[in-house]
Amino acid sequence: MTEKFWLPNGALVLVADGRRALMLRNEGSPAAPAFTVEHRMEAADNPPDSAGHDKPGRVFKGDRRAAVDIGSHHDLEETRFAEVVADAFRTLAEATPDAPLALVAPPPVLAVLRKTLPDPLRARVRAEAAKDLVNHPVAEIARVLAG
């Protein structure tokens, strides 16, 4: 069960994951949201050979040695995409300064969005959901968020 979102007419909702993003506007009422797509984004597909198959880095300190995890290139790409999405959402939100905001994304992406959005926009965020809904139809997203 999800908590009920109460978003007034004109509210902006960012629904994203590490590869796709939808920026929606509520054209309906808080009780019966009707979202229209304001902007759609999708990450570019990178060929599999660019996935980075290097060996872990090494650290030498005195007689000790250790391997250093360099992280997944896939995770880095998702983080970069989330930062680009946050910047695009900032531009849209600044164009409508009175609109309340909502964020819907899986936890890792939601964390990047929170970190990347400037303080004035974070103060306007009225609801958040740690869910991956970006692949759902827009009407289904509205139904899920309305509770």
Image: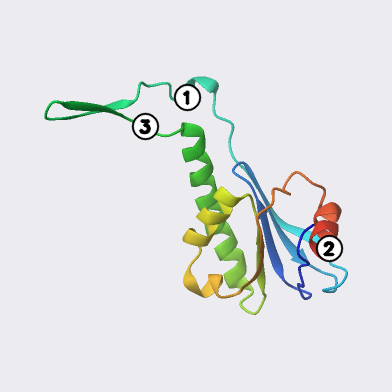
**Sequence-wise first label, 1 or 2:** 1
Q: Is residue 47 left or right of residue 25?
A: left
Quarter location, residue 23: bottom right
How many labels, in total? 3
Q: Is residue 43 above or below residue 90?
A: above
For the C terminus, the quadrant is bottom right
Disc 3 is placed on an element classified as: loop
- Whole-percent x and y of residue 28? 85, 70
Quarter location, residue 86: bottom right
CA gap between label 1 and label 2 equals: 41 Å
Q: Which residue is mark 3?
A: 69
Q: Which residue is mark 1?
A: 50
Look at 21% across and 26% down and name the residue there.
65
The kind of residue tagged 1 is: Ser
**Sequence-wise first label, 2 or 3:** 3
Q: Which residue is mark 2?
A: 147
CA gap between label 1 and label 3 equals: 18 Å
Disc 1 is placed on an element classified as: helix
Q: Nearer the viewer, residue 74 or 108?
A: 108
- Whole-percent x and y of residue 36? 79, 60
**Furthest residue toward right:** 32
Disc 2 is placed on an element classified as: loop
CB atoms at circles 1 and 2 under 8 Å apart? Answer: no
Q: Is residue 2 left or right of residue 41?
A: right
- Whole-percent x and y of residue 7? 76, 72
Look at 48% across and 45% down and name the residue there.
80
Q: Is residue 59 left or right of residue 8?
A: left
Look at 69% across and 67% down and name the residue there.
12
For the N terminus, the quadrant is bottom right
Disc nearest the viewer among 1 and 3: 3
